[in-house]
Image (spheres, rainbow, N blue to C red):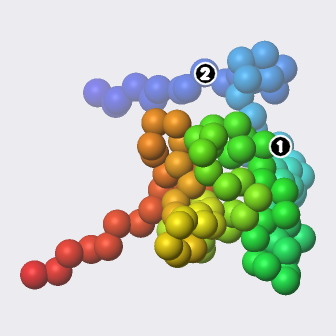
C-alpha cells in the first residue's frame, strides 16, 4: 500500500494579509526601509556629549529634564558630569573642608545612571 501524500493548504496573499502574515518577498522589499527606521530610532536615543558639555569646565550645560526631576533637592545640579566608567551622573559638592565629586542620587538614595553598571568578574 502506498502512503498518502499530505498536501498543506495554501492561502492567497489577500488571506495572508488579513491574518497579519508577511511574505518573505515583502520582507525583502521593505528590509532597507525597516533598517533605516531602526537606525533613526536608535540614533534618537543618544546624546552628543560634545554639544551638551561645557568645554571649559567639563560639566553638563543642561541637565536632562528627567534627571533633574528625580534628583534629590540638596544636590548641586549646576555642576554635573556623566562618568563614562559607570554611566552615572556625579555632581560637585563643596563641603566645609574639601570639594569632591559625589554620585547624583534620587530622593530614595539610589544613584542616577544612564545604564546598569557592569559588575566586575571575580576570578579565583
Residue denoted by label 2: 9
Q: Within 10 angstroms of label 2, few (less than 14), some, or many (20 or more) residues? A: few
Q: Viewer-proximal residue, 3 or 28?
A: 28
Residue 109 location (% of width, % of height): 45, 43
Q: Which quadrant holds the N terminus?
A: top left
- Label 2: state its secondary structure: loop
1 relative to 106 in the view: left or right? left
Instruction: Give how far across and how far down residue 53 sits, in percent.
Output: 82, 71
Tell me which residue sits at (48%, 56%) in the image.
116
Q: Residue visible at 49% across and 51% down? A: 111
Q: Mark 1–mark 2 contact, CB under 8 Å?
A: no
In the image, 115: left or right of 34? left
Q: Which residue does the image show at 85% across and 63% down from the upper left?
A: 61
Disc 1 secondary structure class: helix
Above or below for 99 versus 115: below
* Residue sitting nearer the eye, 115 or 81: 81
Amino acid at each position: 500500500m502506498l502512503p498518502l501524500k499530505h498536501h498543506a493548504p495554501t492561502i492567497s496573499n489577500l488571506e495572508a494579509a488579513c491574518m497579519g502574515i508577511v511574505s518573505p518577498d515583502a520582507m525583502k522589499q521593505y528590509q532597507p526601509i525597516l533598517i533605516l527606521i531602526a537606525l533613526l530610532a536608535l540614533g534618537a536615543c543618544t546624546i552628543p556629549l560634545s554639544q551638551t558639555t561645557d568645554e571649559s569646565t567639563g560639566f553638563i550645560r543642561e541637565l536632562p529634564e528627567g534627571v533633574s526631576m528625580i534628583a534629590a533637592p540638596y544636590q548641586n545640579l549646576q555642576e554635573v558630569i556623566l562618568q563614562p566608567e559607570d554611566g552615572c551622573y556625579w555632581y560637585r559638592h563643596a563641603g566645609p573642608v574639601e570639594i569632591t565629586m559625589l554620585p547624583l542620587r534620587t530622593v530614595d538614595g539610589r544613584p542616577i545612571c544612564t545604564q546598569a553598571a557592569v559588575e566586575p568578574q571575580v576570578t579565583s
